[in-house]
Amino acid sequence: PPEPAGGWAASSNWCGMDAGPQMLYPAQCIDGVVGQLGGRELRASLEGRQCEVGAALATPPPHGSRLADAFGLLVHTNPPRWPRGEPEAESEWEALLASCHTSAFQA
């Protein structure tokens, strides 16, 4: 996957903190922003539900949230991690990533 703008160092010493190598803070990714906007109600709607790698599940946006103002449905996927340094695992990664997209549209 491509590096974020400014390279991976963009997550190092970000506001005086370090996310770690190849890690992003919630405010730097869509999942984190959706989680922040959805708050406790979104977390509660997902509690006990598991989304396997390559799969997707759909939830309504939390009532009265900024998400509800913009979206009728939230689709959550669990993408695979990039197999850095494992070229033999790249085809499995591609298949799981494609499965995320297919599952999201089916949800």
Image (tube, grey):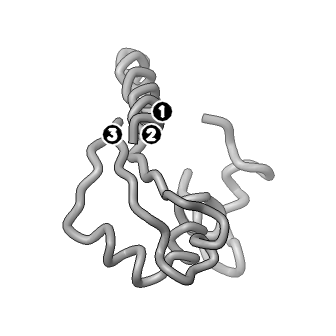
Residue 104 - label = 2
Question: Around disc 2, counting alpha carbons within 10 Å, would you say few (fewer than 14), some (14 to 19), or many (20 or more)?
Answer: some
Q: CA distance from mark 3 to mark 2?
A: 7 Å
Which x, y percent locates residue 13?
68, 71
Tags 2 and 1 touching, CB below 8 Å: yes
Answer with the quarter of the image where residue 32 lies: bottom right
Q: Nearer the viewer, mark 3 or mark 2?
A: 2
Examine the rendered structure and indicate whether residue 54 appears above or below residue 67.
above
Q: Quadrant of the C terminus?
A: top left
Which x, y percent locates residue 81?
42, 40
Query: Residue at left 39%, top 46%?
Result: 78
**Mark 1 or mark 3: whose residue is earlier in sequence:** 3
User: Is 22 in front, or is 59?
Assistant: 59
Kindly identify the amino acid type of the residue bearing the numbered disc 2. Answer: Ala
Kindly identify the amino acid type of the residue bearing the numbered disc 3. Answer: Ala
**Mark 3 or mark 2: whose residue is earlier in sequence:** 3
Query: Residue at left 51%, top 76%?
Result: 38
Secondary structure found at label 3: loop
Give the residue at mark 3: 55
Secondary structure found at label 1: helix
Question: Around disc 1, counting alpha carbons within 10 Å, would you say few (fewer than 14), some (14 to 19), or many (20 or more)?
Answer: some
Tags 3 and 2 touching, CB below 8 Å: no
Q: Quadrant of the N terminus?
A: top right
User: Is 97 in front, or is 40?
Assistant: 40
Q: CA distance from mark 1 to mark 3?
A: 8 Å
Examine the rendered structure and indicate whether residue 96 appears above or below residue 26.
above
Tags 1 and 3 touching, CB below 8 Å: no
Query: Residue at left 40%, top 16%?
Result: 91
Examine the rendered structure and indicate whether residue 60 appears above or below residue 104.
below
Give the residue at mark 1: 101
